[in-house]
Image (tube, helix red, strand yellow):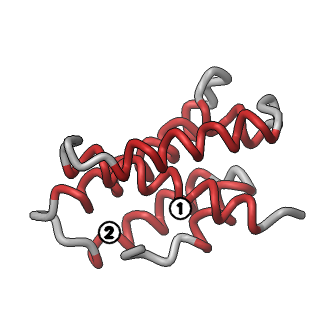
Amino acid sequence: MMLDIKPFVKLIKQKDAKKSREWLETSKGSLDPKDDFQKGYLLALQGMVAALESGGELSAINKILDKKYAQVQVTELSKGARSRAAQKFRAKDEQGFNAAWVDFLNELAGEKS
């Protein structure tokens, strides 16, 4: 994608909201603020950090990190986001939002430890 989110995923996985927010603030300058796809992508990452900061136990990111979703549920989340990101009728910002989730979940799955 347009950002290497590996460091972001690692920080989120460690539940380090402060450093995740710092990484996001530093990295968002490499995105084009006029590009709707990239705006949506950034919005998804910001939402992940906000959910981590709030500690809301109902947020998808916290459920994933707390292993309250079975692997099959995480796979279904990824498939759904991938499908929505590929649908041409969706707004570009929505496609970007879903693409960020796909990238995040793929990276998280690849970082099993």
Position of the C terminus, as image quadrant, is bottom right
Position of the N terminus, as image quadrant, is bottom left
Question: Which of the 4 image quarters holds residue 107?
Answer: bottom right
Q: What residue appears at the point 29 percent right and 78 percent down from the top-left corner?
A: 30
Callout 1 amino acid: Asp
Give the mark, 2 or 1, whose residue is nearer the N terminus.
2
Above or below 39: residue 74:
above
Q: What residue appears at the point 82 percent right and 34 percent down from the top-left corner?
A: 70
Labels 2 & 1 near each other (Cβ < 8 A): no
Task: Give the secondary structure at mark 2.
Answer: helix
The residue pinned by badge 2 equals 28
Above or below 70: residue 21:
below
Task: Give the secondary structure at mark 1.
Answer: helix
For residue 63, side relative to residue 105 (left or right): right
Residue 109 locus on image (x, y percent): 74, 59
Question: Which of the 4 image quarters holds residue 26?
Answer: bottom left
Q: Residue furthest top?
A: 58
Mark 2 nearby-residue class (10 Å; few <14, some 14–19, many ≥20): some
